[in-house]
Amino acid sequence: MARTVKGWRQQYIWDRPRIKRSAPAPLTAEQVEENGRKSDELIARFFETHGVNTGLEKIKDREARTAVEGDTDLNHDNVEAAE
């Protein structure tokens, strides 16, 4: 039960009436197929646009650069102080 403070009735969220929601209609087999096709197209378009560069490829790329250029990472202690 809610208290009254100077004419103001305190109501909490759980005291308010609930909104009744209807259950969503189940998808038909055609809709499931269509959603899967759209998802596959979206993923293919993303990979065409951005390419695929996994973590292992990044590590191999860094190791190859380090072998050719040496360790050029500025966060390591091998950088001499600027004078």
Image (spheres, rainbow, N blue to C red):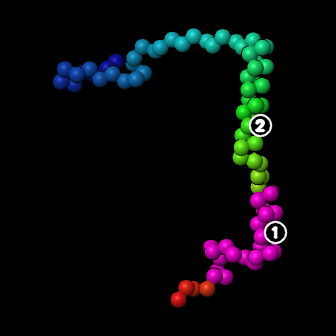
Which of the 4 quarters of the picture holds residue 41? top right
Name the residue located 81 percent from the left edge and 63 percent from the top edge: 60
Dot 2 falls on a residue whose secondary structure is: helix
* Residue 13 rendering spot, x and y as whole percentages: 40, 23
Q: In the rendered view, tell whether residue 37 sits above or below residue 82.
A: above
* Relative depth, front residue between 11 and 52: 52
Which stretch is magenta?
56-79
Q: Tag 1 or tag 2, which sits nearer the N-term?
A: 2
Q: Are marks 2 and 1 in contact (CB under 8 Å)?
A: no
Which residue lies under the disc numbered 1?
64
Residue 2 location, x and y as percent? 31, 20
Residue type marked 1 = Ala
Q: Which mark is residue 78?
A: none
**For mark 2, what is the residue?**
44
Question: Camera-side residue: 77 or 31?
Answer: 31
Q: Hey, which quadrant is residue 58 in on the image?
A: bottom right
Name the residue at 77% across, 70% down.
Answer: 65
**Image point (75%, 12%), residue name:** 28
Query: Disc 2 residue type?
Result: Ala
Q: Which residue is pictured at 73% across the width and 22% down the height?
A: 35
Q: Is residue 76 magenta?
A: yes
> Tag 1, which secondary structure?
helix
Above or below, comparing residue 17 to residue 71 in the picture = above
Number of labels in the image equals 2
Q: Please identify the residue farthest to the front as the structure is shown.
A: 49
User: Is 4 in front, or is 42?
Assistant: 42
Which quadrant, please, contains the N terminus? top left
Q: Residues within 10 Å of mark 1 (few under 14, many from 20)?
A: few
